[in-house]
């Protein structure tokens, strides 16, 4: 196993506790377009999935929505989400202390299915941006959305590190799958261990405070 040189973090649910905010905003916005949706639908089925794919899946179940209505719905949804991030965003417990230990010794970046302005706002509001600088990669900019491995592979190239020397830290199944398919080492931050199983080739983390110890163990293997 290659020595880890670069840590690639997902954003939502991994660095910041934005998933419940997003779930509530989607549950408010999508029914306005005639697409039934609840916060639990997002958390149980669509966590980490790009917005357009959620809408497409709902249209298959409930019928196609007019394009103008869809655009207006997405605009309202994103405005509500940005406001929610500004006013209510919290960081994932333990991540700040973990980054204080890891950031001096490893290249660190963020790779998210979210838009770049949303990643930047999350980093600014949370105060975590100091650990990542401009090393923020959005699937919207790259054109590859998890579970496609292309986003993580792009991040590795941009950081100048081989895929096998990267450790991806992600909470969502789509991100874990993308990282494994990219040939990277994976830490699955599992917030729902009673309902969600960590894949055999990934390493389960139940709390972010344990990330530095996991990185150390992997580099001693």
Image (tube, helix red, strand yellow):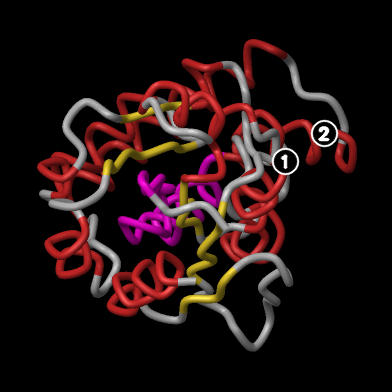
Whether residue 20 appears in magenta in the rendering, the answer is yes
- Say the numbered circle drawn on residue 125: none
Is mark 1 in CB contact (under 8 Å) with mark 2? yes
Q: Is residue 38 above or below residue 203?
A: above
| Nearest-to-viewer mark from 1 and 2 | 2
Counting from the top left corner in percent of width and height, residue 114 is at 46, 34
* Of the image marks 1 and 2, the number of the one nearer the N terminus: 1
In front: 34, or 151? 151
Residue 41 position by quadrant: bottom right
Q: Is residue 104 left or right of residue 147?
A: left
Q: Is residue 3 left or right of residue 106?
A: right
Residue 176 position by quadrant: bottom right
**Residues rendered magenta in the picture:** 5-29
**What's the distance in space between the residues labelled 1 and 2, CA to CA?**
7 Å
Q: Label 2's element?
A: helix
Where does label 1 land, which residue? 35
Whether residue 6 appears in magenta in the rendering, the answer is yes
Counting from the top left corner in percent of width and height, residue 18 is at 37, 55
Counting from the top left corner in percent of width and height, residue 131 is at 16, 45
Identify the residue at horizontal 15%, vertical 70% (top origin): 97
Q: Is residue 32 left or right of residue 9?
A: right
Where does label 2 land, which residue? 59
> Dot 1 surroundings within 10 Å: few (below 14), some, or many (20 or more)?
some
């Amino acid at each position: 196993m290659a020595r880890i040189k670069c840590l690639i973090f997902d954003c939502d649910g991994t660095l910041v506790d934005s998933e419940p905010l997003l779930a509530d905003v989607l549950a408010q916005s999508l029914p306005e377009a005639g697409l039934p949706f609840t916060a639990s639908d997002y958390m149980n089925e669509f966590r980490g999935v790009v917005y357009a794919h959620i809408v497409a899946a709902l249209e298959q179940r409930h019928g196609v929505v007019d394009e103008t209505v869809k655009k207006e719905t997405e605009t309202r949804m994103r405005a509500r989400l940005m406001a929610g991030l500004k006013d209510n965003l919290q960081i994932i417990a333990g991540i700040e202390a973990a980054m204080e230990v890891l950031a001096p010794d490893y290249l660190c970046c963020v790779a998210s299915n979210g838009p770049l302005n949303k990643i930047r706002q999350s980093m600014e509001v949370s105060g975590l941006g100091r650990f990542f600088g401009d090393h923020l990669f959005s699937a919207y900019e790259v054109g590859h959305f998890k579970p496609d491995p292309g986003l993580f592979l792009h991040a590795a190239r941009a950081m100048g590190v081989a895929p096998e020397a990267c450790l991806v830290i992600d909470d969502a199944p789509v991100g874990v799958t993308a990282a494994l398919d990219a040939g990277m080492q994976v830490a699955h931050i599992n917030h729902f261990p009673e309902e969600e199983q960590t894949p055999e080739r990934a390493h389960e983390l139940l709390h972010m405070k344990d990330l530095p110890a996991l990185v150390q163990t992997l580099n001693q293997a």
